[in-house]
Image (cartoon, rainbow, N blue to C red):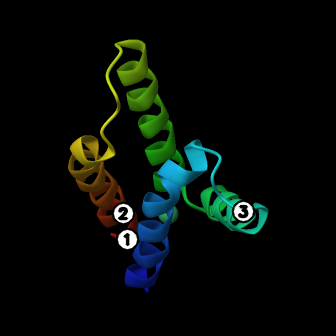
Amino acid sequence: MSEKTLDQCKEVVELVNEYLGHALTAEDRAAFEAHLATCPPCTAYLAQMKTVLNLASSLGNAASHAEVEPQLMAMFQHWHEKKSR
Ligand SMILES: [Zn+2]
């Protein structure tokens, strides 16, 4: 059951860039936000991602999603494990 949740979460993680770049369709955006409403780890992930991207752009660096993702994914999976116990 938690695997299914994690599947949805992976989609959310993949869509974060598009979401923050306002590149999602209205439909995808609604689904994304609906998932966030039920999933605190994804909400936290999004908040972290925004912070990281803002920080990177304020430093004049192009934010590298690939660079921060492994770190955030680890944190995020940790939250899920905690939750399912
Ligand atoms: Zn989630």
Q: Residue, x 42% and y 30% (percent of image)?
A: 53
Where is mark 3, residue-wise?
A: 25
Residue picked out by circle 2: 80
Q: Quadrant of the N terminus?
A: bottom left
Residue type of the residue flagged with mark 1:
Ser
Which callout, 3 or 1, points at the residue further toward the start of the chain?
Answer: 3
Disc 3 element: loop
Check if mark 2's residue and mark 1's residue have beta carbons within 8 Å: yes
Q: What's the distance in space between the residues labelled 3 and 2, CA to CA?
A: 28 Å
Compared with 5, 20 (above or below) is above
Of the residues shown, which amino acid type is indicated by label 3?
A: Thr
Residue 45, above or below 73: above
Residue 28 x/y as whole percent: 68, 67
Three-letter code for the amino acid on which mark 2 is drawn: His
Residue displayed at 40% across by 79% down = 2
Q: Position of residue 51 (x, y in %)?
A: 44, 28
Residue underneath mark 1: 84
| Residue pictured at 35% horizontal, 32% vertical | 63
Snapshot quadrant of residue 32: bottom right
Q: Are marks 3 and 2 in contact (CB under 8 Å)?
A: no
Q: Is mark 2 within 8 Å of ligand 1?
A: yes
